[in-house]
Image (spheres, grey):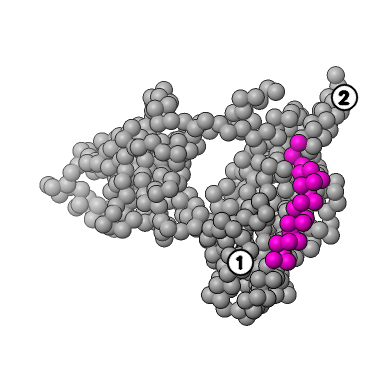
Amino acid sequence: MTDSSTGQAASAEADRIEAAVSARISPTSETLERVARVRTGLVDRVHSAASARRSPLVRALVAGSAARGTFLSDRLDIDLFLLFPPDLPRDRLREEGLALGLAVLSDTETRYAEHPYLRGRFEGFAVDAVPGYAIADPSHPLSPVDRTPFHQEYLTSHETPEVVAQVRLAKQFLRTLGVYGSEARTEGFSGYLVELIVLQFGSLRGFLSAARSWRIPVRLAQPNRDPPRLPAEVALILADPVDPNRNVASALSRRNLATVILAAGEYLDHPSEAWFRPVERSRLSRAESLERLHARGTHAAVIVLPRPDVVDDTLYPQVRKAERAVAEEVSRSDFAVLGSSSAVDADRVLILVEVAHPHRPAVRPQDGPPAGLDRVGHFLEKWTAPSAPVLQGPYVRADGSLAVETRRTDRDLEAVIRAALPRLSLGRDLTPPPTSPAAVHALASTPESPGLSQALDDLLAKRLPWLARPDRDA
């Protein structure tokens, strides 16, 4: 079979698969009609409640996938936005938003992002009631949700039924890879980003055909429309059509984008319905992980920090920063770092680091100045003193610089981490108080928990998602 005929066969198979998947993941016409009725009833109920309490509400609207029909059949939350005058003080915004949410939703729970919002239920559907400001210019928002009406108007005016079907396919594909969701925990593709990408490339396969040859960082906008002063770790740049100075993909990590780039080529060459079936893999237990460490001949330490009372979008960037700080310090301390991971439990934050050996060398080389510098005298005076803990030296290296070798006292990984933690920058909310220092254990001494299993999986079971599927040959 020629390459051309192979490609045609793969394309035909992808057509068949995507048609079957689309039928499975698309909401029925009855569901869409019911959601439309609920949207109308929800907005009407909010306006009635606002009128009854003489609230300064400007507008209530349902936006997002529930409004555009781009939601998946098994995954629907309704986003209700309560928009108030731009000059309303923040505390009054919170007060009015919560009051109107309580007036229309049942089984409510207060949640927190930049400001509080309500999660509850309305006629059988989960609803998030989020307050924001009714602004006139989307390039000058007062809160993170203020651009939402403009996003809604833009997408509604550009999306066709065919595009909506392709958006659902793209969401399901990314969901299977574990990279769908822009929250700090996931660092993936937001729903809005998925819809803009599908609009740009026309379909899931149009997106994947382009993505398979991308090199990070990827720029999908014209250079003069890119957001200014982008951070060095940016993965993808796509200017918001309603605010060209905003990068819609700012939450997306390089790791997750690289996963999609690799998956794009694999799917296009070897299409299978398994690419659209998320699989919940069992996590590694502590006992299984200890067996793996033994087989690898390595060692892992666990740092346990109290979980601060902050929202996830504030917490997870700090957790990743702390993980990097610990791994870098361990590496600087002459351990061979093989990997690190982190996770969050209900009451604690876990940081894991794997090293080639649990003890660093007993001998520590100390660098000195090259011959001829004024500092040579001070170096020699210090390291030739009778009390200097010298094992060997001072001596001259091949490059002409001085050196000395001393004996280390703390050699165990856990002891080194414990001594270093007070001086590390772990994040504003993660740095423990002196009265409650962080605990540092070997893995064998760390209690089991969901977070520990997740961190162990990330540390010791790294594998491309499609290779880890039990049904990957399906």
Sequence-wise first label, 1 or 2: 2
The structure residue drawn at horizontal position 43% and vertical position 48%, both measured from the top left corner, is 346
| Quarter placement of the C terminus | top right
Q: Amino acid at mark 2?
A: Ser
Mark 1 and mark 2: Cα distance apart in space:
61 Å
Asked if 409 appears above or below 297 in the picture, the reply is: below
> Which of 365 and 138 lies nearest the eye of the viewer?
138
Q: Which residue is mark 1?
A: 103
Asked if 353 appears above or below 281 in the picture, the reply is: below
In-image side of 413 versus 179 (left or right): left
Q: Quadrant of residue 99?
A: bottom right
Determine crowd level at label 2: few under 14, some 14-19, many 20+ residues with C-alpha closer than 10 A.
few
Q: Quadrant of residue 273?
A: top right
Query: x, y (%) of residue 355?
Result: 39, 35
Classify mark 1: helix, strand or loop: helix
The structure residue drawn at horizontal position 33% and vertical position 32%, both measured from the top left corner, is 444
The question of residue 279 being in magenta is answered with no
Whether residue 181 is visible: yes
The structure residue drawn at horizontal position 58% and vertical position 33%, both measured from the top left corner, is 280
Q: Amino acid at mark 1?
A: Ala
For the stretch drawn in magenta, the main secondary structure is helix
> Which of 97 and 400 lies nearest the eye of the viewer?
97
Query: x, y (%) of residue 43?
Result: 72, 65
Asked if 229 appears above or below 29 in the picture, the reply is: below
The outermost residue toward the top is 1
Q: Which residues are magenta?
A: 24-45
In-image side of 56 versus 1 (left or right): left
The outermost residue toward the left is 386
